[in-house]
């Protein structure tokens, strides 16, 4: 019943999915942290930019953002992100699109964690002469990250599933392989079940591990 799977690189497709998820998660965490810092910062212009970015990007469909990176940045403006072949260019553009989109959700998850830090701690840090950056980096963010593990885990799980949108610009991940398999094989339900099982294998352990970690590192108040 599963003999036809031998003709397709199923593991390779899911490996591409994992690479997309990991690279996008790292980039989203970095950019999302910067956005969160902007949103709680003392500079009105930066607060305005952070708020506008999050509210606008969160309400744009991910497919539109991914297509913009390909049609707008690459084909119109010639942005290739240092790659030469089409496959690598599309992969990097997909990572960029996922980062731009997911970072807005990371920002809100972190901001919710920042709001759990007692205001008195930040005021005490400023009273002893620490700058805003030092207060944020040494006092607020460490506690915010510990409080945000579970929300960030939900964002990561959503990101893993959102990698399927990369198929729209030809990235050879699981969803694109599924489309090819359905076109070539008369096994719609079986193919769908195999791909769904693959995503369950990726997301379920991730949720369980990060849920356990969230309880382990939670700040006791």
Image (cartoon, rainbow, N blue to C red):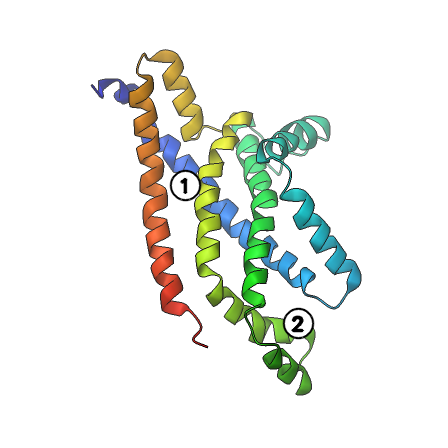
Front one among 16 and 56: 56
How far across and down, in percent of the image, does residue 21 sit? Answer: 46, 43
Name the quadrant containing residue 141.
bottom right
For the residue carrying disc 1, how many other residues have a C-alpha within 10 Å: few (<14), some (14-19), or many (20+)? some
What x and y, as percent, mark residue 26? Answer: 51, 51
Residue displayed at 31% across by 41% down: 201
Image position of 183 with respect to 65: above or below? above
CA distance separating discs 1 and 2: 33 Å
Say few, some or many: other residues with alpha carbon within 10 Å of mark 2 (under 14 / 14 to 19 / 20 or more).
few
Residue 91 rendering spot, x and y as whole percentages: 53, 34
Which numbered disc, 1 or 2, marks the residue that appears first in the sequence?
1
Answer with left or right where residue 109 lies relative to residue 219. Answer: right
Q: Nearer the viewer, residue 73 or 116?
A: 116
Could you tell me residue 220's position as x and y percent?
43, 75
Tell me, for residue 108, which label it has, or none: none
Circle 2 SS class: helix
What residue sits right under mark 2 in the picture? 133
Query: Label for residue 18?
Result: 1
Direction from residue 206 to residue 96 in the image, left or right: right
Q: Which residue sits furthest bottom? A: 128
Please tell me which residue is depicted at 79% across the width and 59% down the height of the picture.
45
* Residue 85 vertical placement versus 185 (above, below): below
Residue 36 shows in this picture = yes
Provide the secondary structure element on which disc 1 rests.
helix
Nearer to the camera, 173 or 209: 209
Q: Residue at x 76, y 56 (%)?
A: 48
């Amino acid at each position: 019943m599963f003999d036809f799977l031998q003709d397709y690189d199923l593991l390779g497709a899911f490996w591409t999915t994992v690479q997309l998820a990991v690279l996008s998660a790292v980039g989203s965490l970095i950019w999302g942290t910067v956005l969160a810092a902007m949103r709680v910062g003392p500079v009105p212009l930066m607060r305005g930019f952070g708020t506008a970015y999050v509210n606008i990007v969160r309400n744009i469909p991910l497919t539109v953002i991914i297509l913009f990176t390909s049609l707008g940045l690459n084909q119109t403006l010639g942005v290739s992100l240092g790659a030469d072949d089409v496959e690598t260019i599309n992969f990097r553009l997909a990572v960029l699109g996922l980062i731009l989109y997911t970072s807005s959700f990371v920002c809100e998850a972190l901001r919710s964690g920042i709001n759990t830090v007692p205001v008195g701690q930040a005021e005490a840090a400023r009273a002893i002469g620490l700058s805003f950056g030092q207060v944020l980096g040494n006092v607020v963010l460490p506690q915010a990250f510990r409080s945000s593990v579970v929300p960030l885990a939900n964002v990561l799980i959503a990101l893993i599933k959102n990698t399927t949108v990369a198929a729209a610009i030809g990235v050879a991940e699981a969803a694109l392989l599924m489309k090819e398999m359905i076109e070539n094989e008369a096994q719609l339900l079986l193919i769908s079940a195999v791909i769904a099982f693959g995503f369950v294998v990726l997301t379920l352990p991730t949720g369980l591990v990060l849920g356990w970690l969230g309880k382990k590192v939670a700040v006791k108040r």
